[in-house]
Image (tube, rainbow, N blue to C red):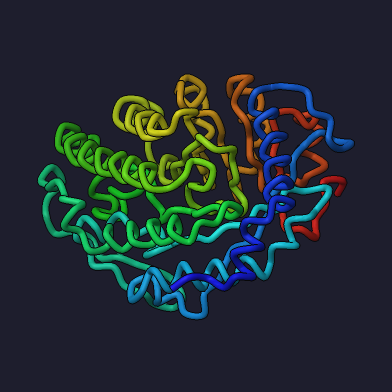
Amino acid sequence: MDISKEAKRILNDERLINHRDMWINRMQNLFDNKPDKFNDENVIGVFGAWGTPSDPGLMLENPELWVKEALESIAEQAEACFDENNYCPLCIEFGLYGVHFVGSIFGADVFFQDGNWYSRYLTNAVGELKEVDLDKSETWQIVKRAAHEFVRQDVKLPFFALPTIASALVVAVNLYGDEILMEMLADPDAAKHDLQIINDTLCKMHSELRNILPEENIHPVLAFERTQPPGYGQLCGCTNQLVSAEVYKELIAPLDDALLAQYPKGGMMHLCGTHDHLIPIFRDMPHLKTVQINDRASEDLEKYYTGLRPDQIIYFMPCEEMTIAQALQITGGNRLVIQKPPAATVKK
């Protein structure tokens, strides 16, 4: 079933596409350290909109219909992208199973309760994780069906945001809880075995979806506020705060960097906790081009700004302890993308 003619017209409107590309070009200039004075503070503010189908359950029951409804929904919001001061990207977000998406593919019992996804831990010991055949995974085939449907609808404007293909450590903790953390110290070979299997699977997922979706439309999770130019990937580094710098450098950083290397320009790491002990390692990761910080991590903006490479960009979500004004004072507006709702302006 095709989307309506009006939605198709809107989502292929050259005026809207040119506006999107103008912001993307400005963002790429920021990534490339090229001068682009587009507002008083010389920073990009980004917070967009996403399509919301009537029933999220359609992801599982009928992913093709979910895509159609999501595209119809985002077409109705298209005029929101005309914000002169901030970039307002438009996307559809196929967030199946939330952060437990990959865990479900590895056999975790994933369930929905009180508005969130949860999963029960695997019962096998760390070191015994088996490779999964993605071709036989019903969950993975649902995602590919949605991606193929997006391509079939032939719309150029919106991003297709992937499910949460998080990171090896995030997935391992979701599968095993604190047992994987203990085994990194007690039996690092067993932990390394499972982490490698997980990361290889994550790399395959990104590769397969990159072969389906156009580069200008494919985007990792939360495309409406972590928007990057085409060619950049993303991983979730939330749980990195749970390990020491030594463990991260030896067991995790090579996997994270290899995952970001699936994209031609490298990519972003999301951080939301106390990760400042890892900044020297982040600095040395060649494919880590961007860090995205929110909540507790935002408080450490100055540490990231001074500790990272001059070519590493910071996506910053303001918080009570680190306001936009403070962020601008620290950075001078350099290497900074501010994530915020449309009501908040860069000047505040």
Please state, as top left, top right, bottom left or bottom right, where the N terminus lies in the image: bottom left
Is residue 119 or residue 72 the one in the foreground? 72
- Taking the spot 71% from the left edge, 44% from the top edge, the residue there is 338
Q: Farthest front residue?
A: 5
Residue 219, position in %: x, y?
Answer: 50, 47
Residue 185, position in %: x, y?
Answer: 23, 35
Q: Quadrant of residue 195?
A: top left
- Taking the spot 69% from the left edge, 50% from the top edge, the residue there is 14
- Taking the spot 58% from the left edge, 24% from the top edge, the residue there is 308
Evaluate whether residue 339 shows in this view: no
Evaluate whether residue 113 shows in this view: yes
Against 267, is 317 above or below?
A: below
Is residue 49 or residue 299 the one in the foreground? 49
Against 17, is 251 above or below?
A: above
Residue 340, position in %: x, y?
Answer: 71, 53
Horizontal relation, residue 105 to residue 48: left or right: left
Residue 98, position in %: x, y?
Answer: 41, 62
Is residue 83 or residue 237 the one in the foreground? 83
Is residue 239 or residue 145 the one in the foreground? 145
Against 135, is 25 above or below?
A: above
- Taking the spot 47% from the left edge, 19% from the top edge, the residue there is 284
* Number of residue marks: 0
Horizontal relation, residue 153 to residue 300: left or right: left
Q: Quadrant of residue 12?
A: bottom right
Horizontal relation, residue 214 to residue 5: left or right: left
